[in-house]
Image: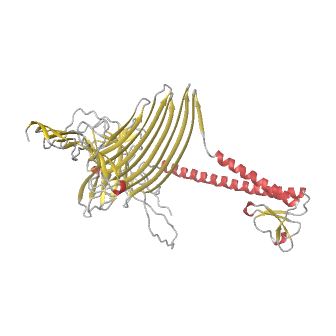
Amino acid sequence: MVLEWDMSQLTAGGSDWSDSTITRFYLWLSSVAGDVFEIDWIALGQIAPSASVASVVDERTARISGDEANASAILGLSSSLQTTNGNVTAAQQAAQAASDKAGGKGEVIYSSTEPATDKRLAQNLWIDTTGAANTPKRWTGSAWVAVTDKVATDAAAAAASALAQVASKADASALQALQTTVTNQGNTLTAQGTSITQIKASIGQQPDNLILRGSFEDGLVDPWSGDARITNISAHPSAGKGVSFYTNSFCGIAANIVTAAGEQFDLSADLWANYMTAGQTARFQMQFYDKAGTSLGYVNAFSVAAAATGFKSYSGRITAPAGSVSARFLTRTEPADGTGRSLWCNIVARRVSSAEAATAQAVSNVEATVTQQGTAITAQASRLDGLYVQVNPEMEGDSSGMAGSTGSLVGVWTEQSARIEDGIAIGRQVETVQAQMGQTNASVQQVSEVMADINGRVSAQTTLKVETNQGGRKVVSGIAIGSNGEEGEILLMAQRLAIIDNLNGQTILPFVVEGGQVFINQAVINTAFIQQIVAGMTIRSAALNAQGLPLLEINFAAGTFTLRGQDANGSTLLNNGGLYVYDANGTERTAVGRLT
């Protein structure tokens, strides 16, 4: 059953029309008295505002063309099946011909199932194709038994050869389905091959556009209210007409969107801000109502200030506030001055699924290109492998500021490229791991790059960078290793650098750099040239005298200095008190300074 308006029953200017809008539908079921119909439900959909009788006919024609394409595909498949069956028949005929030529007097039966009862004759030959074995068998009076006589083997070989030709031909067709492109334009020769593998799983949103009129190619602005005027467009890549809003404009006169608290909507549009007066702002909003029809206020999807930016695409997400049961869309161009206006096209609003919108994606892209321009040859190959998972739960409040956003994502990417051009060969590999939860994120990236050219220049470098961002605090650490053919260097970036010794389960930090200072737990230095020493403790010599005292001892904290010398004839002591000389028996012989 089809529900449609009957143009013969609706006359322009009659009571069925209001402002060029059809206000009445007729449902024709039957004119026969006594007929009874039971209708479970009737749904009235809305054709796109730009649709006309001609466009509906065109769409119907397109669908018919689609059916014809499907029919063609089916015929093609049927033809393939007939060809295959013909090749099987040809194989059986080849087997029969081989049998006849070899002197066979019976029938050759080619199948994977046992022949019928009336075929159980001793002179008949059955080529059993089970498992592609092509086994020749004869009836012994009680069973089909494999045989090896020349007639049988010749027939089996002929059948196998016929099928092999069919298989080879099918394989060739499959190879032809792989496409390689080589183009020649003047002196430019380009060869390119591309392989893309993509696996994607998602729980997404509804594709329907909730905006009653988002395209203006038919020259109509209805149902947008206010001062809205059709404007021809030349600067947009796809739209030929748009709508200029001089004032605030509602899409329809009533709240035509059914919603609930917490439901989300994604709004987007292409907007030209060049015609707006300095100080004007254009906004895309939704107005929400509760069940009593009381306005709950306006929620902003995005705002655009006056600027000479040309056409740009804008988007934003809106969450219905508590108590919402209905809503409507509107654009604002304010303050209105009668001259400044915002130019819009491709206006779209979609309802986000109430479940969390989540995506999981794996992408592998391999591309190789060889190009010759005159005498210059460029060869380039690139590969991108990635795993990407994202979850976008519902947000709270004004989505223009993403308040309450707890969206999360994690991704792993590997990008590889190789290029030769103008005598320069460059290879590059980038590996990235990233995780984000709301405004908190962390990433690890390793980049390796090599270069060599015909002038003898070379370089090789690799960098490893780890980065975190939490609460607005960005912390970066990394290491860079490089060589340019003349010198190599290693650079470290961190707030704290330490060497850790975990021998025998005991953690030791023999070397630490932190806060611009170097901390060494214990050091052995063979030769050192030190311009300045600021010491705060004690310096002692490793050598000791006969009494077990260090030969040199300087206590910076106490401000004392001691120097001891010793031989077989005695010892010498130099300290803060003076100079003292002792004989072999320890008796003081000479004292200079404070006498003891």
Query: In the image, what residue occupies the spot 59% across and 34% down?
Result: 183
Q: Is residue 200 left or right of residue 396?
A: right
156 or 531, which lies in front? 531
| Residue 337 in the image, given as x and y percentages of width and height | 23, 39
| Residue 259 in the image, given as x and y percentages of width and height | 32, 60
| Residue 443 in the image, given as x and y percentages of width and height | 36, 48
User: Is residue 258 at all visible to an observer of this figure?
Assistant: yes
Q: Which image quarter: residue 128?
A: bottom right
User: Is residue 225 at all visible to an observer of this figure?
Assistant: no
Query: In the image, what residue occupies the spot 65% across and 49% down?
Result: 174
Q: Is residue 56 left or right of residue 393?
A: right
Q: Is residue 427 above or below residue 547?
A: above
587 or 279, which lies in front? 587
Query: In the image, what residue occupies the spot 35% across and 43% down?
Result: 478
Q: How is the image coloured?
A: secondary structure
Q: Is residue 206 above or below residue 377?
A: below
| Residue 274 in the image, given as x and y percentages of width and height | 31, 36
Q: Is residue 346 left or right of residue 300?
A: right
Q: Is residue 188 left or right of residue 310?
A: right
Q: Is residue 126 above or below residue 98?
A: below
181 or 432, which lies in front? 432
Query: In the image, what residue occupies the spot 44% across and 55% down?
Result: 360
- Count of picture labels: 0
50 or 470, which lies in front? 470
